[in-house]
Image (cartoon, rainbow, N blue to C red):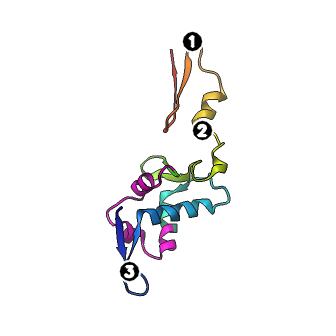
Amino acid sequence: MISSPIDPPSGGISTITDADIVEAVVAILGAQEDPATPIYLATLGHLLSAHFQKPLRNILGDRKLRTIIEGAGYGRLLVDGVAHALTARLSGEANPSLALRYDPVFWAAFAKPPPEGKQRVVYPRRPFNLVDRL
């Protein structure tokens, strides 16, 4: 496990591990009014800085928050979006109350019938994908 050295207020050296970061992310996301609501990674970074009382770039070093969440999140956290609009949210494994919620791809798949002469296929692995084919 990779850890990052930081200086705690006492002046000694301690480390914040990837697991510590993931636990803080889970706590932050779980404390929301609706835990299923995603948070932008930029916002999450500010909240983590406040939580650890250090700038996040000092904690992460040359690593990326997305990499830590995806690697050490053990399926409890999901990262969605592209480039500047990445979000993190709890998965159903982290919060059992979310397990019964449908992914938006499933809502799109069944919201309207497939076009005439085509059949709709939903690939059952994340990231879910919807395809209309002949």
Residue 57 vertical placement versus 79 (above, below): below
The reply to whether dot 2 and dot 3 touch (C-beta < 8 Å) is no
Residue 105 vertical placement versus 41 (above, below): above
The residue beneath circle 3 is: 7
* In the image: residue 58, left or right of residue 100: left
| Magenta stretch: dominant secondary structure | helix
Badge 2 marks a residue whose secondary structure is helix
Q: Which mark is residue 117?
A: 1
The amino acid type of the residue labelled 1 equals Gly
- Residue at (57% x, 12% y) in the render: 117
Residues in magenta, as a range: 48-75
Residue 49 vertical placement versus 11 (above, below): above
The reply to whether dot 3 and dot 1 touch (C-beta < 8 Å) is no
Closer to the N terminus: mark 1 or mark 2?
2
Could you give the CA–CA distance between mark 2 and mark 3, rounded to whole angstroms?
A: 43 Å
* In the image: residue 53, left or right of residue 120: left
Give how far across and how far down residue 73 sits, in percent: 47, 54
Residue 113 vertical placement versus 104 (above, below): above
Badge 3 marks a residue whose secondary structure is loop
The reply to whether dot 1 and dot 2 touch (C-beta < 8 Å) is no
Closer to the N terminus: mark 2 or mark 3?
3
Most extreme residue toward the left is 62
The residue beneath circle 2 is: 104
- Residue at (52% x, 65% y) in the render: 24
Give how far across and how far down residue 68 sits, in percent: 41, 57
The amino acid type of the residue labelled 2 equals Pro
Observer-nearest of 4 and 36 = 4
Q: Magenta span has 70? A: yes
Observer-nearest of 56 and 74 = 74
